[in-house]
Image (cartoon, rainbow, N blue to C red):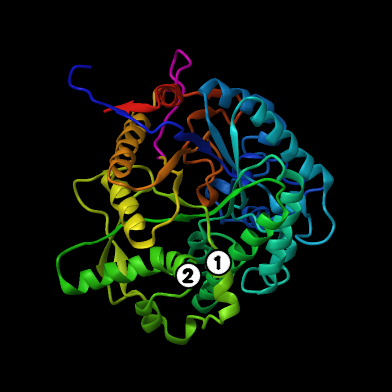
């Protein structure tokens, strides 16, 4: 280790992993759970790779005790999971499903018994189908419905859960659901997409207020955004402006309303009347103070001018000479760049890296081990960038690997593996990968060798 350097993290730094309900739970129609938009979408032919669905997923709903034991074995300080809205409220509103709340109640107790801090995400894309049938996120009524749902969950869990996240990646719900149609409801309608983004952020503000009013203890509330630094493909003026537009739609269209209560001026100029006017009563909710900003980072974005693309006139570039995973470029310096930009431009009270991980092919070797060296390298290099950002003043308080276990990767089905724990989808056996053992050591040492 003579050439290695140890990067120690601040005392109390929170090391965790993350999952989401639809991706791991299974039990899609058990114990009073209503259908979600993902149940509907994945059951439609041609929507998901291989015809895969989340009907069983990793069967966490039935195997949660084993999964919590694995978390304890890894020494996790925290576990970020999402609540399934239709498991708690099968119609999205009205009658509460006690069995659904009981499941999360048991999970929270089991985590706390092992010293693992629960981080609860209220919405990770699995909208109750009953609410989609009422118009989905373009319907402003969902803003209030979401706050009511937040209140129901906080009434049950708010005496024990300190850390709450309202939404996960509203950009993805907006763009993949309503521009490209790769996610439910599978719509391609740009004006609707703008409305969806607005209602998601407004519902976040309503939910923050509902959580604080309901929880019976001091709580920490935030929202998780997927963010990326955007680079221009060349130094040309056209590409530089394309990068600025991409930064607007990916980053600032979500950050600016939350921190400033308004949309960016260049986005208003670009989209004109599609961008909603924000009345003062809505602005008050948009800028409801948050205790932390959750940041999901996987890769940078590289943009070039492309006049053939409607509206935005840009295309994403995949630079030559870079390393790539099954889905994206691998670019660790982008995480440092992003954290410093968020800190310098928006000054959040605290930052949590709520997801960071990589899909690379891995499998069980002859001796039962999963040697996922590329994942270890990815995590090590990104954790080093987090340390650098903390050293330079960014208030990063925690880091969560995506994901605890292999799971249903949305429209990619089970093709992509992100987990620290391998899931054999034939028999649902769990095997801690080499990356999981490595991460356990990082947690024990509160730092990383680079």
Can you say whether 147 is above or below 216 in the image? Answer: below
Q: Which residue is mark 1?
A: 201
Q: Is residue 372 visible?
A: yes
Q: Nearer the viewer, residue 160 or 360?
A: 160
**Dot 2 surroundings within 10 Å: few (below 14), some, or many (20 or more)?**
many
Quadrant in which the C terminus is drawn: top left
Q: Give the left or right position of residue 261, taking residue 185 as reference.
A: left
Q: Which residue is mark 2?
A: 257
Tell me where residue 358 appears, x and y as whole percent: 40, 40
**Dot 1 surroundings within 10 Å: few (below 14), some, or many (20 or more)?**
many
Tell me where residue 265 appears, x and y as whole percent: 37, 79
Earlier sequence position, callout 2 versus callout 1:
1
Tell me where residue 389 appears, x and y as whole percent: 30, 44
Which residues are drawn in magenta? 358-370
Q: Nearer the viewer, residue 265 or 195?
A: 265
Can you say whether 241 is above or below 103 in the image? Answer: below
In the rendered image, residue 50 lying in the magenta stretch gets the answer no
The kind of secondary structure element at disc 1 is helix
Q: Are marks 2 and 1 in contact (CB under 8 Å)?
A: yes
Q: Quadrant of residue 232?
A: bottom left
Q: Give the left or right position of residue 51, taking residue 90 as reference.
A: left
Q: CA distance from mark 2 to mark 1?
A: 8 Å
Say which residue appears at 45% left-offset and 23% top-offset: 440
The extreme top residue here reads 367
Q: How many marks?
A: 2
The kind of secondary structure element at disc 2 is helix
The extreme bottom residue here reads 273
Q: Give the left or right position of residue 392, taking residue 79 as reference.
A: left
The dot on residue 185 is none
């Amino acid at each position: 280790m003579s050439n290695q350097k140890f990067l120690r993290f601040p005392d109390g730094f929170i090391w965790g992993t993350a999952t989401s309900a639809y991706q791991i739970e299974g039990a899609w129609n058990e114990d009073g759970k209503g259908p979600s938009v993902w149940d509907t979408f994945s059951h439609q032919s041609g929507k998901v790779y291989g015809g895969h669905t989340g009907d069983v997923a990793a069967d966490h709903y039935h195997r949660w005790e084993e999964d919590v034991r694995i978390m304890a074995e890894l020494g996790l300080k925290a576990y970020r999971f999402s609540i399934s809205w239709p498991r708690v409220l099968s119609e999205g509103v009205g009658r509460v499903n006690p069995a659904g709340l009981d499941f999360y109640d048991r999970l929270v107790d089991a985590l706390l018994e092992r010293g693992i801090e629960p981080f609860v995400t209220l919405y990770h894309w699995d909208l109750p189908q009953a609410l989609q049938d009422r118009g989905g996120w373009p319907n402003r009524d969902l803003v209030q419905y979401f706050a009511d749902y937040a209140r129901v969950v906080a009434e049950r869990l708010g005496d024990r859960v300190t850390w709450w996240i309202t939404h996960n990646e509203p950009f993805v719900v907006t763009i993949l659901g309503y521009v490209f149609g790769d996610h439910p409801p599978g719509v391609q309608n740009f004006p609707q997409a703008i409305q969806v983004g607005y209602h998601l952020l407004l519902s976040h503000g309503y939910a923050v207020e509902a959580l604080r009013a309901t929880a019976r203890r001091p709580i920490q509330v935030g929202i998780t955004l997927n963010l990326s630094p955007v680079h221009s493909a060349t130094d040309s003026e056209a590409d530089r402006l394309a990068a600025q537009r991409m930064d607007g739609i990916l980053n600032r269209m979500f950050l600016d309303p939350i921190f400033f209560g308004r949309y960016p001026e260049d986005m208003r100029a670009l989209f004109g009347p599609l961008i909603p006017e924000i009345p003062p009563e809505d602005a008050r909710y948009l800028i409801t103070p948050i205790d932390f900003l959750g940041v999901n980072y996987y890769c940078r974005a590289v943009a070039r001018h492309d006049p053939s693309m409607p509206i935005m006139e840009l295309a994403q570039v995949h630079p030559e000479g870079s390393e790539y995973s099954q889905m994206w470029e691998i670019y660790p310096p982008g995480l440092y760049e992003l954290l410093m930009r968020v800190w310098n431009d928006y000054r959040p009270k605290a930052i949590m890296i709520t997801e960071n991980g990589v899909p690379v092919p891995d499998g069980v070797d002859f001796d039962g081990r999963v040697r996922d060296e590329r994942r270890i390298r990815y995590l090590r290099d990104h954790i080093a960038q987090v340390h650098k950002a903390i050293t330079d003043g960014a208030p990063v308080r925690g880091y969560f690997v995506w994901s605890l276990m292999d799971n249903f990767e949305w429209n990619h089905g089970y093709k992509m593996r992100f987990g620290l724990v391998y899931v054999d989808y034939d028999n649902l056996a769990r095997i801690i990968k080499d990356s999981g053992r490595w991460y356990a050591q990082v947690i024990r040492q509160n730092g990383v060798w680079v």
